[in-house]
Image (tube, coloured by chain):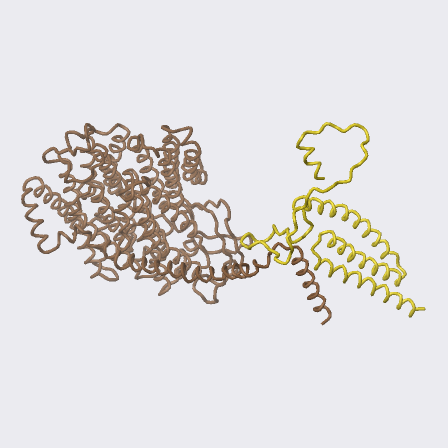
Amino acid sequence: MFSIPTLLVLVPALPLAATLATAALGKKVLREQSHWPAVAGIGLSFLAALLLLFQVRAAVAQADAGPVRIGYEEVVRLWTWANVEGAGGMEPGSPGPSPPRQIALMDFAVEVALRADPLTAVMLVTVTFVSFLVAVYSIGYMHEDPGYWRFFAYIALFVFSMTMLVSVSNFLMLYIFWEAVGLCSYLLIGFWYQKPEAAAAGKKAFLVNRIGDFGFALGVFLIWTTYGTLNFHDTIHDTGLTTMGVLGQSRLAEPGLFVAGGIATAICLLLLLGACGKSAQFPLHVWLPDAMEGPTPVSALIHAATMVTAGIYMIARCAPLFHASGDAFQAVALIGGFTALLASAIAVTQTDLKRILAYSTISQLGYMFLGLGAGTLPGITAGMFHLFTHAFFKALLFLGAGSVMHAMGGVIDIRRFGGLRHRMPTTHWTFLIGCLALAAFPGFSGFFSKDEILVALHENSLDGPSPALYHILYLAASATAFLTAFYTFRAFILTFYGPERIPHEAGDHAHESPNSMTLPLVILAIFSAFVGAWFFFTHGFSEFLAHTPSLAYPAMHTEEAAHAPSVHAGVMVASALVAVAGIGLAWLLYLRWPKTVDRLTAAMDAVGLYRLSFGKFYIDQAYHVLVVRPLAGLAWASYWFDRYVVDGLVDLIGLAPRGAGAVLRSLQSGMVQFYALAMVLGVLVLIVALLV
Amino acid sequence: MIEHELNLLTNFLVVGALLFGIGLIGFLTRRNMIIMFLSAEMMLQGVSVSLVAWGRYFNDLDGQILVIFIIAVAACEAALALALILMLFQRRGNLDIALWHDLRESNLPPYVDHELPEIPPYQSGPWPTLTPAGRRPDLPQQETDYRSHV
């Protein structure tokens, strides 16, 4: 019915149309009904993405039978945005092009092209599905907010940007939409801009992201100078010549066409910096916990399920570049492992429910980086699989937290409420499922995806380029899993069990949320419970993803015989035990022996550990002293220099005519004959000048 | 013949220059507005004389045509200038140009001429009376007062 190109265009076009409609009509016409364009647009976009996924599946099956290609991709060229002929020259003998294709390589052509391949299809479905549920949830949550229409316009704009980000086929376009989601994030975090914390958090998120974006931009420049093109795909010219795309079929097909060595590592590290910014990895993770100042649906949508996955997507997309570099994957894994452990250690002591979830997001994103950092096909697909399952259960947890916050009259501190399970039964059950999935309890989706990452790390530690590193990372990942289970259930038990406590802000509002809020919770809970097991036992996810060109090229497959997902009984049992132990410890401490918690806290505080974790390892403070203060000083000095030295010089020049005017002004006596005399003298001067 | 023409030209030019110079000096030194106006006219005529002289020297009518225009323009100018001078005289009762310096910079002091003898303000003197002809129209009191000064 719909062809792949039509669907590819429809997926981003519908949310864009919704944005424009809401922006144009929301304030005056739609008012309380402003959610309809966004909900309808994103919902239809989800249907289109789903159809696209099935069509890509069918096409992948056909491609298997057809002529040999590197994975499956279909590129839809919409138009050429910019074409500068002969923009860049390649030095002869540079490893980018093979000689006969060199001629067409000089053009700087930015094609607005969308691509369909398994990776994009999966991302599109995930993004639009979660966004749709969040949009439905927001109808209830944002009810009676003065900026109701503005909120839905932003949400739809965000979905447009994110769907474009995952479907464009060009590094420059990727960068543009990379920035666009950053902008949407800024707008949505600072949605309640009259609240100073929210405005500051929006600014912080934007600025910290800028650091990453700067690295990403440099990476894109370096890709252009190295490869002579920014397109992912190959371009076949009228002359029959082919410009090889950076990740095109022809480059993937032949070994040795990717630049190796220092320059490749530089590209990858710059891209990694960009990914760290967007995916909130150490050292650029500081913006994400603050981003919780935004409305809760935003936290669920952007800062848990979709936007922060842009970095993961980008690294998965650029896997061949990282592969060519060799060492870059280890940097990815190292950052991921460190961030995962750091964030989970912070989350253990936080008291703000949304902040706990924010740190768990950082930690889980670190997990995804670990999976990608394994560098093997199972590792990367495991990272993407974790992204997929995480999107469901993290959105569920955030929306659940939002439901609690809604009922508690905006209070989100877990010390101030408790025992809510009777008052909010639906939220309680769905939150429990989300927690079990996040804690990787056996049988729930998080368990399978996390297990695949652990298996990939474990295999790398057995036989890989640097077994010791991966062994340490495996242990770190296991420790993270334990901490994750512990802090997740700490928050869960403190919120829903124990004696019932309700803050006075709640008033008579402490009841279950409306249907538009609980329905998405139930749907997400069902997915969080079963989606992992379904794909784990059918192996459908990783096999499907393996047909992405970036993941299907031969170099990816040399290290392992086949890309069948391996099941390690030992790893699986170990991770299950770790999860159960974490949950059990939380249950014992917070439900059975609450006194022990205080004693334990005091003991930890004596050695400074508790304070360190509670203070988030003082990273924000360190940045403030090391980065913000010197920069503010520099800014102040620059301001002073500009104000008094540069402006002073300009003012001085401005004073000269005024001074001359002040002197000459006394000549303006108003006497007619004086003017006449001046004219005569002037004529005389002219005559003398002519004669001499 | 040519020498004669050259001499003639020189003479005319000398006369023109003298007229111009006298006019210039008169314009710059005299403070009576009517004399200044006459001086300006004299400068104009000096230029006209030289134009005619050059026209004759080159055997060309253009110079004379131009002078005809100058005379026409000067006649208009004379009408206007005299009307203006009359207005100014009615304002201050005096023809001294030094009384008019309103266009000076606002922060400069007004020009005060100490050497100028104190001229008593113009008194409405005996005006020539004309033989009444016909009936005098009924004018409002204000108008009659005003007219009496004209």
Image position of A143 (left or right of A245): left
Give me the residue at 16% from left, 54% from top: A612
- Residue B63's x, y, as percent? 85, 57
Give the chain ID for the brown colour: A
Give me the residue at 47% from left, 66% from top: A91
Give me the residue at 21% from left, 29% from top: A509
Give the chain ID for the yellow colour: B
Pick the front one: A557 or B77: B77
Residue A221 visible to the viewer? yes
- Could you tell me which quadrant the N terminus of chain A lies in? top left
Instruction: Please tell me whether residue A17 is drawn above or below residue A463 in the rendered image.
Output: above
- Residue A275's x, y, as percent? 32, 53
Pick the front one: B41 or A486: B41
Q: State the residue lying farthest toward the right.
A: B1
Image position of A449 (left or right of A168): left
- Residue A44's x, y, as percent? 39, 33
Pick the front one: A500 or A237: A500
Instruction: Please tell me whether residue A613 is drawn above or below residue A8 in the rendered image.
Output: below
Give me the residue at 78% from left, 47% from top: B76
Residue A292 position by quadrant:
top left
